[in-house]
Amino acid sequence: APQGAPVRSGMDENKPLKVRLTFSVILVGVSLLFAAVVTDHWAVLSPKVEEYNATCEAAHFGLWRLCTKRIFMREQGPKEKGCGPISLPGEHNCSYFKHFTPGQSSEIFEVTTQKEYSISAAAIAIFSVGFAIIGTICVLLSFGKKRDYLLKPASMFYTFAGLCIIISVEVMRQSVKRMIDSEETVWIEYSYSWSFACACASFVLLFICGIALLLIALPRFPQNPWETCMDAEPEH
């Protein structure tokens, strides 16, 4: 019977290390989440270019703001139809969406359905950030003595944060698709940029590491039948 005791203590000693390693990866996911929420490079839109040696207007936007750039276009290759790429030099102008800051102009978001998509994506992303912050606070508090019970709610908060940001990604994807398909907009070409990639990567890290943190926090099941008997108090 005494042979089982050292194995159990060894498993308990590895638990803090596993928590810290998982938490390190989670912090990377939280950083990517913040980067995606505050930046404006979720999608890049461009109109069809019919005249060359002239300026055209491309746009990129995020959850809160739309940025346009006037680009001087020369002759393009046969596969290129739109204005851009957005990395070319040009006059740059950014403005917050009208439904977030009254008085600002954002013509492509005037359509009611488009406005609803934008507000929904931003609101869900805020929920994701909130869950990530609460989860981080729980993990930091769990580093104190006899506070391992906080790891379970922390893991759930991180999992919810991952689910919320991927829902926001899907809402944004549908928003871009609607703009391209709509006859009320001039955009024909679109691509997803690095903010969109940050959001997708944060979902993967937060969701997977949230589940991993939950598995680490759960009590270890006995590997041998007699381990349960060892834990039993002796009869008097």
Image: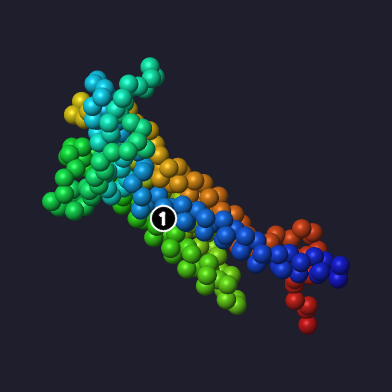
Name the residue rendered at 57%, 60% in the picture: 24
**Where's the C terminus, which quadrant?**
bottom right
Which residue is painted at 76% across and 69% down in the image?
Answer: 9
Report x, y in % for residue 41: 36, 43
Q: Residue 44 in the image: x percent, y percent?
A: 34, 36
Whether residue 183 is visible here, answered yes or no, is yes
The residue at the point 25 percent across, 41 percent down is 91
Left or right of 199 in this view: 8: right
Q: Residue at x 33, y 31 (%)?
A: 84
Vertical comparison of 162 with 82: above or below: below
**Residue 105 percent coordinates (x, y):** 16, 45
- In this view, the residue in front, 168 or 78, is 78
In this picture, is 106 found above or below 144?
above
The residue lying toward the viewer, choosing from 200 and 60, is 60
Q: Quadrant of the N terminus?
A: bottom right
Above or below residue 235? Residue 131 is above
Kindly identify which residue carries mark 1. 34
User: Disc 1 marks which amino acid?
Assistant: Phe
Q: Which quarter of the picture shows residue 195?
A: top left
Report x, y in % for residue 216: 63, 60
Dot 1 alpha-carbon crowd within 10 angstroms: few under 14, some 14 to 19, many 20 or more: some
Residue located farthest toward the top when viewing the structure as drawn? 78
